Image (tube, rainbow, N blue to C red):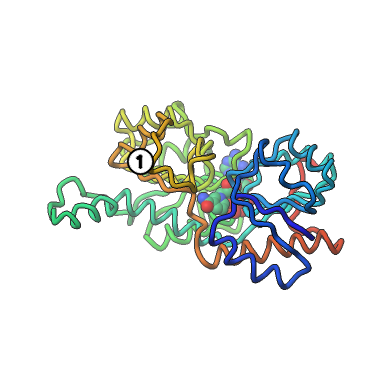
Amino acid sequence: MKIAFYSTKPYDKIYFEPYSKDYDITIKFLAVPCKEETISLAAGYDAVCIFVNDYLNKNMIKQLKDMGIKAILLRSAGFNHVDIKTAYECEIPVLRVPSYSPEAVAEFAMALLLTVNRHTHRAYTRTRDFNMNINGFMGTDLHGKTAGVIGTGKIGQAMIKILKGFGMEIIAYDPYPNPNLDVTYDTIENVFRNADVITLHCPLTPETKHIVEARTIELMKDGVYLINTSRGDLIRTEDLIEGLLQKKFAGVGLDVYDEEDGVFYEDNSNEIMEDQQLARLLTFPNVLVTSHMSFFTKEAVEAIAKVTLKNADAVQKGLPLENIVLPAGV
Ligand code: NAD
């Protein structure tokens, strides 16, 4: 199988190349992202392999069908960037990596919370400037506070373990509550109302788009902490900025952003920042934005490489496709 591998970064090659030798697979590493302008590069290959800020819309998938592409391989758990229905109609299986390291993402979510709470990102620059003043850095004990977890799947559960380790009470919302979890489920409104920390671990779907917006921010406690390591579009950024200006939030940690496409994962340091909302977000002292890197541990990247190539091999050998993504209702 020949794979056209989009959005390659140096670490992708390091982890994918050795494992590809275990299979009858060759990979063409392309630096460009997968979008309308670059989809033609997939001609002559058997499969495409894409990352979170690539996308495949209806028109692109139809082009892949005409090229004879046999599989769409996602190097991610999330699949909101692919038109799953069209892929299904075109009989191109979409395969994902459902669980590479939920702990990697949960640990990063906690790192964001600890950082915005205790201001370590600012303390770092202050002490390097030999400014040993701690004014403005007062945080709050997490112990005894209430964390609201939205989405109690694999990452949500890993986060719950960590939060409990910090002595926090957990309230949660998930449309499919897990009876085996020792947490109190409530309506999403009540979770927003009663939590001191809100952490988002649900997928981006039409139902979850903008679950954090003016109306739900209004419900939240003053001085709440908000952490998003899931997908940017869960939050309506305009409303978040308004909430920040109203001093609603004690701290906000964002590893994802709704307009990250084309900006995140790139060195833009010589560019003028055109995105006014991102520019505004980056000015708040109590907001920390990172570049969609929660997944980025050795263990997770290794697991992504192994599972992606196993998915590809299953397609080429006609084996059962255990990680196939099907449209809702199929
Ligand atoms: P998962 O499928 O194990 O869990 C998702 C949970 O969300 C499920 O329990 C589901 O019932 C719940 N859910 C569905 N609709 C919901 C809704 N409307 N409100 C609340 N909960 C809802 O997925 P996971 O492995 O825990 O991953 C969660 C998300 O994290 C992914 O969808 C992805 O977007 C994101 N993610 C981000 C990174 C990163 O590097 N930042 C890495 C991996 C995953």
Q: Is residue 133 visible?
A: yes
Q: Is mark 1 within 8 Å of ligand 1?
A: no
In the rendered structure, the answer to whether residue 250 lies left or right of residue 43 reads left
- Residue 245, percent from left and from top: 31, 29
In the image shown, does 164 or 211 lie closer to the viewer? Answer: 211
Which residue has dot 1 on it?
224
Q: Residue at x 55, y 59 (%)?
A: 102
Relative to 234, does residue 183 appear above or below in the rendering?
A: below
Q: Residues within 10 Å of mark 1 (few under 14, many from 20)?
A: many
Image quadrant containing the N terminus: bottom right
Location of residue 107 by image quarter:
bottom left
Q: Residue at x 31, y 36 (%)?
A: 283
Q: Residue at x 84, y 39 (%)?
A: 89
Q: Is residue 175 visible?
A: no
In the rendered structure, the answer to whether residue 233 lies left or right of residue 46 reads left
- Residue 187, percent from left and from top: 53, 38
Q: Secondary structure at mark 1?
A: strand
Image quadrant containing the C terminus: top right
Q: Residue at x 57, y 45 (%)?
A: 202
- Residue 20, percent from left and from top: 70, 67
In the image shown, does 49 or 152 lie closer to the viewer? Answer: 49
In the rendered structure, the answer to whether residue 21 lies left or right of residue 234 reads right
- Residue 132, percent from left and from top: 13, 55
In the image shown, does 291 or 230 lie closer to the viewer? Answer: 291
Q: Residue furthest right?
A: 318
Q: Amino acid at mark 1?
A: Val
In the rendered structure, the answer to whether residue 82 lies left or right of residue 111 reads right
Relative to 251, does residue 246 appear above or below in the rendering?
A: above
